[in-house]
Image (cartoon, grey):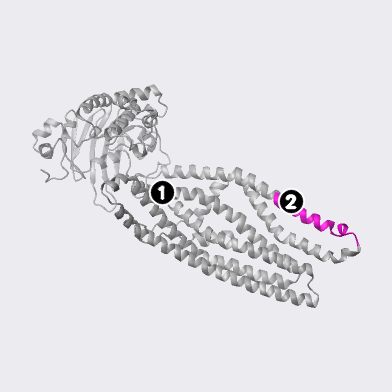
């Protein structure tokens, strides 16, 4: 029954179609949902057994104690002629024993499930989900809101344990309770058992009938709120821009359409719950009316006792009370399915770039880089690189220059394997980067971006990120070489000072010096600089250029330049235009050739390249 319920809930999952930025995505199958949940709960067999045991005891208790109460009531008139304690001792002891068994099972549940399993289950889901998210490709994070992914990450952590509890505690318990209740009521008269059986069929069948509809609406509702969360995080991450451009009203208006969609989805979902509860409520009214009629008729005709009256009414009252809880659980269960499926749709999404099954660690001895007939294009865009062949000799210092969009950053990103090439090979010391592990590739390359990425952690932790086993003295030494030590020392907490989210507490130049210190500490054999000194004042830039020059020695260095003066000491300069390398040589030879490089050099304003060809 339960697998069938989830099959109905998950089998037809689709994304929300084109509402704002919500896109249709591939379905998550019921097999994936079950496989995932099984993979995270199979480590807790004892707790699962306790959950089944507790549900079974509760289901038995729901009918057994009313049956014992029936026996007590039937024996009361007979006990007038004898000691009442002797007459009722056995049923009373059984009644109390059943209660003791119930409360003991709940205490076992509290220990093995709520204390031992659930906290560890949430931790396991968090660890597994984070590992899967960290394996995603670069384009995955370019195409998804960080806030939306965070919400789905949290939804999965919270929803799977709740899903498990509803399935095991409520649905399994209710199924067993109905089965035992039907058998118990049948002991009075098979007609009462049939009444309960028919009503149970309506209850379960209605749940299955409504479930697919609930799931679709819950999925839509969850999709909207994932997008809303992502957009809100995006706005808050750029709060300074919102304030400086006075666009608070604009940002609120941008969210209104998505909020309206969420409101409509929520209303549709609760209308469905309304009609489900309407059907359940009136069907149970009919069941109660039929029971009362035949109980009174049976009592009048002598085939129903006072105890039978109590048995049937108590079981029916217990069932109706639990039914209302279950109907609430069904609505919550459909929301949980929506959240889990939304989360798994992202978390279980296969990364575009994966290590090969026979991948090995990259070993860099010299740092020679070869593009061997490389072809690459972004999705939906004409090819950027066509049959590109070029060799970057080991130890060379190579500058990349060209207009924005010419292919410089893509060239570097392909070396980092942030994107997968369409055809050809990229080799480092003769090793195809598609056959080595991504971690070993990235360990071998030091990257200093133009806009450094810092964690909301201490300065010490951010610099040590370059080499996690570095000693404090080594961190300080790298900071001194990057000319960061002096400003770090002025902070009240020194190296233990927090930098704020994305390093917001630091100036652009300070962030860049931290990134340089981190790269110095990493000391990778291949170095990539994306105008690493562009945020620095002239005096500091001269000091750091010396440190960078020392860092470059013996390394294959690639420098993306926005100020051509940076390239004066490069061994080689590659000039990019529309994905092609149109010039290749030293500064002196390129100036003499009267080509694009000479044009760029002549049109620099304040030392920076123009954005377009016609910039003057």
Q: Residue at x 84, y 64 (%)?
A: 75
Task: Check residue 252 for magenta coloring.
Answer: no
Residue position marked by numbered label 2 in the rendering: 100
Residue 219 vs residue 444, the one in the foreground: 219
Residue 189 position, x and y percent, is: 75, 71
* Magenta part of the chain: 82-103
Residue density around tag 2, few if under 14, some if 14–19, many if 20 or more, within 10 Å: few
Q: Position of residue 215 (x, y in %)?
A: 48, 61
Q: Residue at x 66, y 69 (%)?
A: 197
x%, y% of residue 234?
34, 48
Q: The C terminus lies in which quarter of the figure?
A: top left
Q: Position of residue 55 (x, y in %)?
A: 66, 55
Q: Quadrant of the N terminus?
A: bottom right
Q: Residue 612: which disc?
A: none
Q: Is residue 87 magenta?
A: yes
Q: Residue 101, relative to residue 368: is it above or below?
A: below
Please tell me in which quadrant of the rendered image residue 560 appears: top left
Label 1 packing within 10 angstroms: few (<14), some (14-19), many (20+) = many
Q: Nearer the viewer, mark 1 or mark 2?
A: 2
- Of 160 and 271, nearer the camera is 271
Residue that numbered label 1 is attached to: 149
């Amino acid at each position: 029954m339960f697998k069938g319920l989830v099959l109905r809930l998950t089998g037809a999952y689709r994304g929300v179609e084109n509402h704002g930025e919500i896109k249709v995505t591939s379905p998550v199958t019921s097999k994936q949902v079950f496989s995932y949940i099984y993979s995270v709960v199979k480590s807790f067999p004892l707790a699962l057994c306790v959950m089944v045991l507790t549900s079974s005891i509760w289901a038995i208790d729901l009918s057994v104690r009313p049956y014992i109460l029936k026996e007590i009531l039937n024996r009361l008139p007979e006990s007038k002629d004898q000691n009442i304690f002797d007459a009722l001792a056995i049923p009373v002891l059984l009644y109390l024993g059943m209660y003791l068994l119930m409360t003991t099972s709940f205490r076992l549940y509290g220990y093995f499930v709520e204390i031992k399993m659930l906290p560890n289950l949430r931790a396991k889901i968090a660890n597994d989900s984070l590992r899967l998210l960290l394996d995603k490709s670069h384009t995955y994070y370019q195409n998804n809101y960080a806030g939306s992914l965070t919400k789905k990450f949290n939804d999965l952590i919270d929803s799977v344990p709740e899903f498990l509890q509803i399935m095991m505690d409520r649905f399994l318990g209710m199924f067993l309770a109905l089965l035992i209740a039907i058998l118990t009521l049948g002991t009075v008269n098979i007609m009462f058992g049939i009444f309960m059986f028919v009503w149970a069929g309506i209850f379960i069948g209605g749940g299955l009938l409504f479930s697919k509809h609930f799931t679709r609406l819950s999925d839509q509702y969850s999709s909207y709120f994932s997008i809303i969360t992502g957009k809100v995080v995006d706005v808050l991450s750029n709060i300074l821009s919102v304030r400086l451009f006075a666009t608070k009203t604009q940002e609120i208006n941008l969210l209104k359409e998505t909020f309206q969609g969420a409101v409509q989805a929520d209303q549709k979902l609760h209308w469905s719950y309304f009609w489900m509860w309407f059907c359940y409520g009136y069907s149970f009214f009919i069941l109660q009316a039929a029971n009362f009629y035949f109980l009174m008729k049976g009592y009048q005709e002598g085939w129903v006792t006072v105890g039978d009256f109590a048995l049937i009414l108590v079981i029916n009252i217990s069932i109706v009370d639990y039914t209302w809880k279950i109907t609430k659980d069904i609505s919550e269960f459909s929301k949980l399915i929506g959240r889990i499926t939304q989360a798994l749709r992202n978390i279980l999404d296969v990364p575009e770039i994966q290590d090969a099954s026979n991948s090995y660690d990259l070993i860099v001895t010299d740092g020679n880089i070869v593009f061997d007939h490389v072809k690459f294009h972004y999705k939906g865009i004409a090819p950027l690189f066509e049959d590109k062949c070029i060799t970057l000799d080991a130890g060379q210092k190579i500058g990349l220059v060209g207009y924005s969009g010419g292919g410089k950053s893509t060239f570097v990103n392909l070396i980092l394997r942030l994107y997968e090439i369409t055809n050809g090979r990229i080799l480092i010391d003769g090793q195809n980067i598609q056959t080595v592990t991504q971690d070993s590739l990235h360990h071998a390359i030091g990257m200093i971006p133009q806009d450094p990425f810092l964690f909301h952690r201490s300065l010490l932790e951010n610099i040590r990120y370059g080499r996690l086993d570095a000693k404090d003295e080594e961190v300080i030494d790298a900071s001194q070489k990057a000319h960061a030590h002096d400003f770090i020392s002025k902070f009240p907490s020194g190296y233990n000072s927090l930098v704020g989210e994305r390093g917001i507490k630091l100036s652009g130049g300070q962030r860049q010096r931290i990134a340089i210190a981190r790269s110095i500490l990493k000391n990778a054999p291949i170095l990539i600089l994306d105008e690493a000194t562009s945020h620095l004042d002239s005096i500091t830039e001269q000091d750091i250029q010396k440190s960078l020059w020392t860092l470059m020695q013996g390394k294959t260095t690639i420098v993306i330049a926005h100020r051509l003066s940076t390239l004066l000491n490069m061994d080689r300069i590659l000039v990019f235009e529309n994905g092609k390398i149109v010039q290749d040589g030293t500064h002196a030879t390129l100036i003499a050739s009267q080509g694009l490089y000479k044009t760029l050099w002549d049109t620099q304003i304040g030392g920076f390249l123009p954005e377009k060809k016609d910039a003057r």
